[in-house]
Amino acid sequence: MTYKNGKDVLPPNLLEELQRYIQGELLYIPKPDNERAAWGEKSGSRVLIARRNEEIYRCYRDGSTVRELERRYHLSGESIRKIISAMR
């Protein structure tokens, strides 16, 4: 994210209106919701976690205990149980 001066990018009337609410501070203007990517979509984290969760469920279904899965995936027992229950 880059910083831009409002004088350089906004029409004067819009700049004046914004100055009624905020002056000399940073203002974050988010993208429209239809242009925003969901968490993990750009980085691929969402897919990696989904695959990991499927693998955890498969291992559990094939006989691994929650304790074994905790050590293998470095997650708490509560997290492992949540993943297992969500996959059922």
Image (spheres, rainbow, N blue to C red):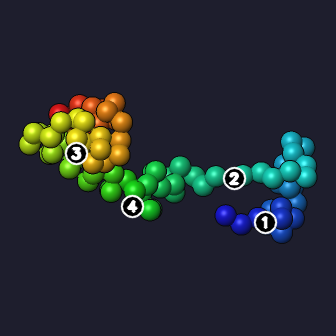
Q: Nearer the viewer, residue 28 or 87?
A: 87
Nearest-to-viewer mark from 1 and 3: 3
Nearest-to-viewer mark from 2 and 4: 4
Using the rendered image of the protein, determine whether residue 80 is visible from the camera's viewpoint.
yes
N-terminal of the two: label 2 or label 1? 1
Name the residue type under label 4. Answer: Gly
Q: Position of residue 82 (x, y in %)?
A: 30, 32
Nearest-to-viewer mark from 1 and 4: 4
Tell me whether circle 2 and circle 1 mark residues in contact (CB < 8 Å).
no
N-terminal of the two: label 2 or label 3? 2
Residue 56's disc is: 3
Q: Which residue is mark 1?
A: 4
Using the rendered image of the protein, determine whether residue 16 is visible from the camera's viewpoint.
no
Note whether 26 is above or below 43 in the view shown.
above
Residue beneath the point at 45% across and 62% down: 42
CA separation in Å, label 2 and label 3: 39 Å
Mark 1: few, some, or many residues within 10 Å (few <14, many ≥20)?
Answer: few
Residue 37 is left or right of residue 56, and the answer is: right
N-terminal of the two: label 1 or label 4? 1
Quarter occupied by the C terminus:
top left
CA separation in Å, label 2 and label 1: 11 Å
- The secondary structure type at the circle numbered 2 is loop
CA separation in Å, label 3 and label 4: 19 Å
Mark 4: few, some, or many residues within 10 Å (few <14, many ≥20)?
Answer: few
Name the residue type under label 2. Answer: Ile
Q: Position of residue 31 (x, y in %)?
A: 60, 55
Q: Nearer the viewer, residue 44 or 68?
A: 68
- The secondary structure type at the circle numbered 3 is helix
Q: Which residue is mark 4?
A: 44
Quarter occupied by the N terminus:
bottom right
Q: Which residue is mark 2?
A: 29
CA separation in Å, label 2 and label 4: 25 Å
